[in-house]
């Protein structure tokens, strides 16, 4: 189940090509990394995507976070996953925001916290992640109305603080 969710997260990230990422998504690093990923050579994908991630490319940071999250091409490392996801999330990368929510919802590398998970799902929804609503609905089944309200306020506060 977790592996299926992870693959869905990464595939969604691979398919979301925002206009602001044109340079990365037309680069050799992206395409060679995607080819390596698709063929199961996750170590090569990590090598190719980590360089632009370290240079601050948000989309690449999200990919690197997802690879650490799933332990693909590297040892599973939730701390590293969260660090890369946060870098990408702060740049408005909705798939990384969904990844952070998933980590809070599952308690991977952080204390399980469905209010915080729902907050991140709402942020991902705001930034256009098509699957975020599905996760919001699942979280809402586990939360009180007060928790849902609190998560919504937290999401609005985060978005307000990070909008440019």
Image (cartoon, rainbow, N blue to C red):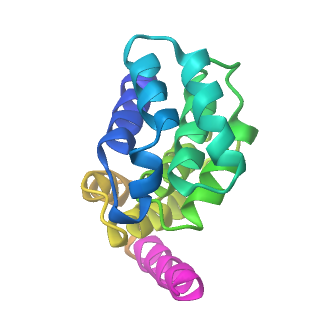
Question: What residue is drawn where x is 58% and y is 57%?
Answer: 88
Relative to 104, residue 20 above or below: below
Horizontal arrangement in the rendering, residue 26 relative to residue 151 (left or right): left
Main structural element of the magenta stretch: helix, strand or loop?
helix
Residue closer to the observer: 136 or 83: 83
Which quarter of the image is occupied by the N terminus? top left
Of 75 and 145, nearer the camera is 75
Identity of the residue drawn at 47% across and 34% down:
28
Closer to the camera, 3 or 32?
32
Rendering coords of residue 159 (x, y %)? 50, 81
- Quick check: is 93 in the magenta stretch? no
Q: Is residue 49 above or below residue 130?
A: above
In the displayed structure image, the side of residue 122 where residue 105 appears, left or right: right
Q: Nearer the viewer, residue 136 or 25?
A: 25
- Residue 142 percent across, percent down from the top left: 39, 54
Up/down of 141 relative to 38, above or below:
below
Query: For the point 47% across and 71% down, which residue is it?
Result: 147
Q: Is residue 125 above or below residue 54?
A: below
Query: Image quadrant of residue 46?
Result: top right
**Number of marks present in the image shown:** 0
Verify whether residue 162 appears in magenta.
yes
Residue 11 in the image: x percent, y percent?
34, 34
Residue at 35% of width from left, 72% of height from top?
A: 126
Magenta-tinted stretch? 146-164
Residue extending farthest top:
40
x and y percent of residue 38 in the render? Answer: 37, 18
137 on left or right of 139: left
């Amino acid at each position: 189940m977790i592996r299926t969710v992870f693959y869905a997260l990464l595939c969604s990230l691979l398919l979301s090509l925002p206009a602001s990422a044109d340079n990365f998504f037309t680069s050799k690093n992206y395409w060679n990394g995607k080819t390596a990923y698709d063929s199961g050579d996750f170590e090569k994908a990590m090598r190719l995507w980590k360089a632009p991630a370290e240079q601050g490319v948000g989309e690449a940071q999200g990919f690197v976070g997802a690879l650490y999250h799933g332990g693909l091409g590297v040892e599973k490392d939730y701390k590293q996953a969260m660090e890369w996801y946060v870098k990408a999330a702060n740049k408005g990368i909705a798939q990384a925001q969904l990844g952070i929510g998933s980590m809070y919802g599952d308690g991977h590398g952080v204390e399980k916290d469905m209010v915080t998970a729902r907050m991140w799902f709402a942020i991902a929804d705001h930034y256009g992640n098509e699957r975020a609503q599905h996760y919001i609905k699942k979280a809402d089944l586990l939360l009180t109305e007060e928790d849902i309200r609190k998560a919504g306020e937290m999401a609005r506060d985060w978005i307000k603080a990070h909008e440019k």
